[in-house]
Amino acid sequence: MTPGHGRPTRPPAGAGKVPLMASSSDVWLSSAIAWGLAVLLVSGCGTVPVVPDRPTSGALHSVDSPLARSVQASAPNPAMTGFLLMPNGFSSLDARVELASRAVHSLDVQYYLIANDRTGRLFMRSLRDAALRGVRVRLLVDDLYTIGGDEMFRDLAAFENVEVRLFNPFCCGRQSVATKFIASITAFEHLNHRMHNKLFIADGVVAVMGGRNIADEYFARSPTSNFVDMDVLVVGGVMQRLRDIFDAYWNSREAHPVEAIVIATGDRHDLRRAFDHAVDDGEQMRSIPVPATDMLGHRPLGRELDEGLQLVWGTAVAFADRPEKVNATTVEAARAMSAQMNIMDRVSASARSVVISSPYFVPGPSGVQAFRDLTGRDVKVAVLTNSLAATDVPLVHTGYARYRTELLRSGVDLYELSPTRMFRNDELLVPAMSLGRLHSKAAVIDESIVYLGSVNLDQRSDSTNTELGLLAESPELARQVIDVIAMAQRGSSYRVRFARDGVSLEWFATSDIGDVILTQEPEATPLMHLQNLLFGPFVPEQLL
């Protein structure tokens, strides 16, 4: 089984998946490709940009900032790592903005996606405000989904104290994802590899990492669809490793200054004024409605920092793929640079139980066998993933469905998130009438070891994209992660099981009016089934 991800999910503002991995529901893709081909006939093919000269730099580690003092006051032991789990979207967004507002020395920020929506603009404004106070800001963004945000990233780099770099950038065709690939078609194998990491470090002493990108739907701010996700704030012993990981990506040959890719037409004053107009005017100025406590009883981070951090403590190891994984020319070479074994080695060694949340779950034959070996040793295994109706990448569900019967026969408990049951679950604080989708990547082993990060249990995370994760040993953190997953299982999911005949499948859930038993994929439309039937067999599993 491969942990995964950097899969291009469907982000806000209409961005789509990478061609050939695309959701079959991306009906815009064929017209975009046709338009892009017309552009190619006129302009010719582009090439991968030449790596420009750019300065290297290292992380700053503050020992005297207010954030550093808050961490020092809370730490029982400098070698230990403190954790604050953040399952609530509003609180998690507020935490990033709060840390940016309190940083005095540095912000190191690395994301797969920062959308040009109200959440993205709020986030970018917080980085600018920090830079204006003299904070050094280093922003690294994967170049796949910069569509519609090129100018925002370029213009932020016009401010003093700010550097912005694009990871594995496209040379041209920047009108859409489709045209990016078409304009660089000869480099498709290289550009299909993306940086899926998500990391936010303030003053070198506090980090936020996990599954969330920066866009409305990752923080329960979209009126149409929102992700169930998890982040964790970490301090203490693991921070040195996280600083080193960021530096490795920042200084890699794959990180290009945004100015070398998105050419400016005005002077720095004009760019700054355009950025100010983009982020200071509009709906993003509204305050974030942070609850007094989240589902775990945690207070907003500002109160935590003012009144004393209430963290759970343990030990932790951070791991990441090497940035040059995107240059791998074979699956074997990519896997040699993959962080996935850090998770699967621990899963395979479990003695009692494994609880997994993976939105894109394609275990493959080896993964099925690994789970069969576990259940054969009386290890209880439960997996929460998306249903066909909930997933934003339907073809991935086809890959998962190939193994569903074998997993059940192996004794694995399977739960599939329902998009409509989720918004009725008050514990998850998702806007009413928006569709729910699972996006959290987490695992708990033997009620004591926790994985959190960007890695999905799929082929893309294993052999295509770069990933970042955290393995923590903390029974209290493990209990919290299990509680959050259980909330989704209990109130927002269907349990998949065999029907009475022992062959066909049924989906079971409890409700206010009694038990619900369905014999078809819940809430999936005939069109969803038809699309997967037509396209699923032709998509190689390593692209799912």
Image: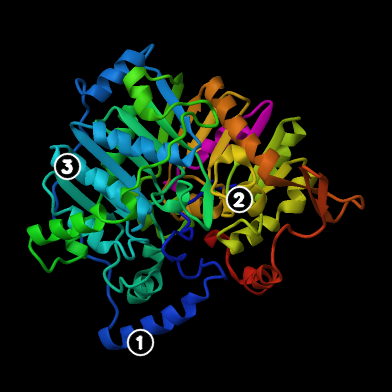
Q: Which residue is mark 3?
A: 131
354 in the magenta segment: yes
Label 1: state its secondary structure.
Answer: helix
Picture coordinates of residue 327, whole percent (x, y): 35, 57
Residue 38 circle label? 1
Label 3: state its secondary structure.
Answer: helix
How many numbered discs? 3
Q: Is residue 413 left or right of residue 250?
A: right
Q: Find the magenta span and give its range.
A: 336-355
Q: State whether residue 2 is above or below residue 88.
A: below
Picture coordinates of residue 531, whole percent (x, y): 64, 72
Query: Residue at (25%, 56%) from the top-left corner?
Result: 281
Measured in 3D between alpha carbons, the distance from the residue under mark 2 to the one under mark 3, in whole angstroms, is: 40 Å
Q: Residue furthest right?
A: 501
Mark 3 vs mark 1, foreground winner is 3
Measured in 3D between alpha carbons, the distance from the residue under mark 3 to the one under mark 1, in whole angstroms, is: 42 Å
Q: Earlier in the sequence, mark 1 or mark 2?
A: 1
Disc 1 crowd, CA 10 A, few/some/many (<14, 14-19, 20+):
few
Instruction: Specify whether residue 57 is in view.
Output: no
Query: Residue at (76%, 50%) from the top-left corner?
Result: 406
Q: Is residue 123 left or right of residue 270?
A: right
Q: Which residue is mark 2?
A: 361
